[in-house]
Image (cartoon, rainbow, N blue to C red):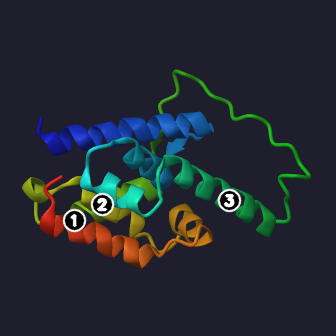
Amino acid sequence: MSAIDHYINDIIVRGAAEARADGSAATEAHHLLLAITAVEGTAVHRVLTAAGLGRQAIRDALDREFEHSLGVAGVSLTSYGLPEPVRHAKDHPKLGASARLALERGFAAAKGKKDLRPAHLLRGVLAAGVGTVPRALALAGVDRAGLIDRVEETLTRDSW
């Protein structure tokens, strides 16, 4: 397997672990984003940390998005105690629609498999027009378009 194959597999496995920790039956794009932040030494990790988007900052943004979405439905986390997510070690979350689309967008942005790099995967996650990731980043005050531009810049000057 090539380096990018190992990276993609690692991101999917880490994303599934994030989904399992959330009690989710599916690995979604936001789980992949959390997984991407966990892999140090890549150009995308440097872009994210330079933007103040380490794993904890993204987790906090996702938590705010969850609370905001509940609020839109008239539910307040402070008024209702949510149960802890049910976690089963044997559960293997399947790739959800947003994760599949993020991967497809990332793969499509590369000229071919030999050109595929971590930045393509992050670009695929960030490029979603709707969903949890864009809502969370907007609530966190992140300039998503500017972040995508910085990710794309790494494709022209950084190999990994």
The residue under the point 85% across, 59% down is 75
Q: Can see residue 101?
A: no
Where is residue 160? Give x, y as percent: 18, 52
Q: Distance between the Cα atoms at labels 3 and 1?
A: 29 Å
Q: How would you rate the neighbour count of disc 3 (Cα within 10 Å): few for under 14, some for 14-19, many for 20 or more?
A: some
Dot 3 amino acid type: Arg
Residue with the mark numbered 1? 154
Pointer 3 or 2: first along the chain: 3
| Residue 104: numbered disc | 2
Which image quadrant is residue 128 in? bottom left
Dot 2 amino acid type: Glu
Residue with the mark numbered 3? 64
Figure check: 2 above or below 106:
above
Dot 1 amino acid type: Thr
Where is residue 115? Give x, y as percent: 10, 59
Q: Distance between the Cα atoms at labels 3 and 2?
A: 27 Å
The residue under the point 51% across, 62% down is 133
Pointer 1 or 2: first along the chain: 2
Between marks 3 and 2 in the image, the one whose residue lies nearer the viewer:
3
The residue under the point 92% across, 52% down is 79
Figure check: 147 above or below 16:
below
Mark 3 lies on a secondary structure that is helix
Mark 1 lies on a secondary structure that is helix
Between marks 1 and 2 in the image, the one whose residue lies nearer the viewer:
1
Q: How would you rate the neighbour count of disc 1 (Cα within 10 Å): few for under 14, some for 14-19, many for 20 or more?
A: many
Pointer 3 or 1: first along the chain: 3
Which image quadrant is residue 9 in? top left
Where is residue 94? Give x, y as percent: 45, 40
Q: Can see residue 65?
A: yes
Q: Are marks 3 and 2 in contact (CB under 8 Å)?
A: no
